[in-house]
């Protein structure tokens, strides 16, 4: 075998999402330092997936912060404890925190993120959703810059960052502003596909810097224990 370059041989530290099939699709987990856009249509499972990644960390001693820009903290808790019965316990024990972010201005938003991370030592961060950056700016270039700035903050603090994006029904794009996917290192798209009246949930790793990953649409399910991904199955198996 030819001697590999240092780049190829570089040891990649992977952060497990804790969703086994997704970690497999990612080649073992999210490469440390990558900031990931979780995007999809309404109801595709973005909040459930992001909460699950934080719960996995929280159960394993990595503090998680869930910044919610739309729903109340109580909404997120109620939705999540259906799947993760220890959700409230993890909050009460200080392993998980849901933070309602004021939507006054970007500087306050940014300071809230920084001060919460510094006060808690959080290692897994969700921002739900980036779409609300439109409250702060009137042009997409400013939004792109802000996404990059928040990404840089999370990287400097050595956090896994999950930014939730949104796709409107019927739109053939990956995000609201068309810039979020460029400003993040990875993109995971959730969707619901239809064939012959059959609807199947799917997840696809669109891009992920620093790793080889599956590119196929993987079947996914939302069960009573949360998200399950089947990387080795086909979406619509021929019958
Ligand atoms: N207890 C449950 N069991 C299975 N699926 C559920 C359950 N509760 C909600 N769902 C599914 O999860 C979807 C909501 O997922 P969510 O993560 O909130 O989506 P998004 O954040 O992308 O809008 C619902 O539309 C429903 O289809
Ligand atoms: Mg949601």
Image: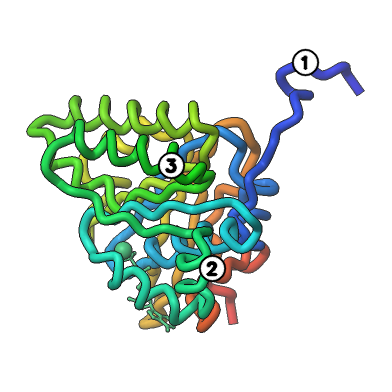
Q: Is ligand 1 less than 8 Å from the beta carbon at label 1? A: no
Q: Label 1: which residue?
A: 5
Element type at mark 2 = strand
Camera-nearest label, 3 or 2: 3
Q: Position of residue 109 (x, y in %)?
A: 23, 39
What number is the disc on residue 219? Answer: 2
- Per the model, the C-alpha gap separating discs 3 and 2 is 39 Å
Label 3 Cα crowd, 10 Å radius (few <14 / some 14-19 / many 20+): few
> Is 18 placed left or right of 235 in the picture?
right
Asked if 194 appears above or below 211 in the picture, the reply is below
Q: Earlier along the polypeptide chain: callout 2 or callout 1?
A: 1
Disc nearer the start of the sequence (3/1): 1
Looking at the rendered structure, which numbered label has been put on residue 119? Answer: 3
Nearest the eye: 98 or 56: 98
Q: Is mark 3 within 8 Å of ligand 2?
A: no
Q: CA distance from mark 2 to mark 1?
A: 35 Å
- Dots 2 and 1: beta carbons under 8 Å? no
Q: Position of residue 52 (x, y in %)?
A: 51, 64
Tell me, yes or no, if residue 198 can be seen here: yes
The residue sitting at 53% across, 52% down in the picture is: 63
Q: Work out whether residue 19 can be spotted.
A: no
Residue at image location 41% in from the left, 59% down from the top: 190
Say the numbered circle drawn on residue 238. none
Res 7 quadrant in image: top right
Contact between marks 3 and 1 (CB within 8 A): the answer is no
């Amino acid at each position: 075998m030819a001697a590999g370059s240092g780049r190829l041989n570089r040891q990649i530290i992977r952060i497990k999402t804790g969703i086994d099939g997704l970690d497999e699709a990612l080649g073992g987990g999210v490469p440390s330092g990558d900031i990931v856009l979780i995007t999809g249509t309404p109801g595709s499972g973005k909040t459930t997936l992001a909460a699950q990644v934080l719960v996995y960390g929280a159960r394993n001693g990595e503090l998680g912060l869930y910044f919610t820009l739309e729903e109340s903290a109580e909404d997120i808790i109620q939705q999540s404890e259906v799947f993760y019965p220890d959700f409230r316990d993890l909050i009460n024990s200080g392993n998980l925190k849901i933070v309602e972010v004021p939507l006054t201005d970007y500087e306050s938003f940014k300071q809230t993120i920084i001060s919460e991370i510094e006060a808690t030592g959080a290692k897994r961060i969700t921002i739900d959703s980036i779409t609300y950056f439109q409250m702060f700016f009137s042009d997409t270039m400013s939004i792109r810059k802000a996404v990059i700035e928040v990404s840089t903050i999370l990287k400097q603090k050595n956090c896994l960052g999950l930014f939730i994006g949104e796709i409107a029904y019927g739109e053939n794009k990956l995000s609201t502003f068309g810039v979020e996917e460029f400003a993040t290192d990875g993109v995971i798209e959730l969707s619901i596909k239809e064939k012959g009246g059959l609807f199947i949930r799917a997840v696809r790793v669109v891009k992920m810097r620093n790793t080889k990953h599956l590119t196929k649409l993987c079947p996914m399910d939302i069960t009573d224990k949360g998200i399950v991904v089947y990387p080795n199955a086909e979406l619509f198996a021929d019958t």
